Amino acid sequence: MNNFGGPPGPGFFGFISELPLFFILFGGLLITLVVGAFTYAIIKGLKTWSSNNAAEILKQRCKVVDKRTEVSGGSGDSSASTNYFITFEFEDSSRKEMHVRGNHYGLTTVGDQGELSYQGTRFKEFIRQPSH
């Protein structure tokens, strides 16, 4: 018997109709949260991408003041992935941390001075200049 007094329906919906209301509501809430999180992440990524594309490319003299990595994954049989970040300090003492590729990370050391090119939050290049 289903909740409506008749025999249970065939297949999946027949199974669902026999579940207690709590499990139906909890399952619906869980699905809504997962779909909402994915939707939020996609919209946020598109917004950042669009904002970066609309921004002008800036070039500023700066100095590398810090470098860091962020490793995720790598447990069991899964592979690890590494994100690379460099913090630049500009002549007005403001700082900006940029996500960079591994090759830029490896070629840059703390104390390097040069010209940073970036577009919004997107790193373009860092051209090292000899210090005087």
Image: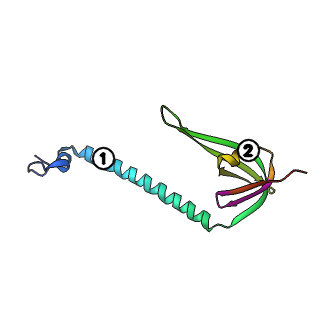
Q: Position of residue 95 (x, y in %)?
A: 73, 52
- At mark 1, the secondary structure is helix
Residue at the outermost top position: 76
User: In the image, what residue occupies the spot 19% across and 50% down?
Assistant: 13
User: How far from the left and from the top, in percent, is residue 111?
Assistant: 81, 45
Magenta stretch bounds: 114-123
Figure check: 58 above or below 67: below
Q: How many marks?
A: 2
Residue behind mark 1: 27
- Residue 93 in view, yes or no: no
| Image spot of residue 4 (x, y percent) | 12, 52
Residue 118 part of the magenta segment: yes
46 on left or right of 56: left
* Foreground residue among 33 and 59: 59
Residue depicted at x 75% and y 46%: 108
Q: Residue at x 76, y 52 (%)?
A: 89
Q: Residues within 10 Å of mark 2 (few under 14, many from 20)?
A: some
Whichever of labels 2 and 1 marks the residue nearer the N terminus, that label is 1
Depth check, front residue: 26 or 14: 14
Q: Amino acid at mark 1?
A: Gly
> As rendered, which of 117 and 9 lies closer to the eye?
117
Give the Cα distance between marks 2 and 1: 46 Å
Q: Residue at x 20, y 48 (%)?
A: 12
Q: Amino acid at mark 2?
A: Asp
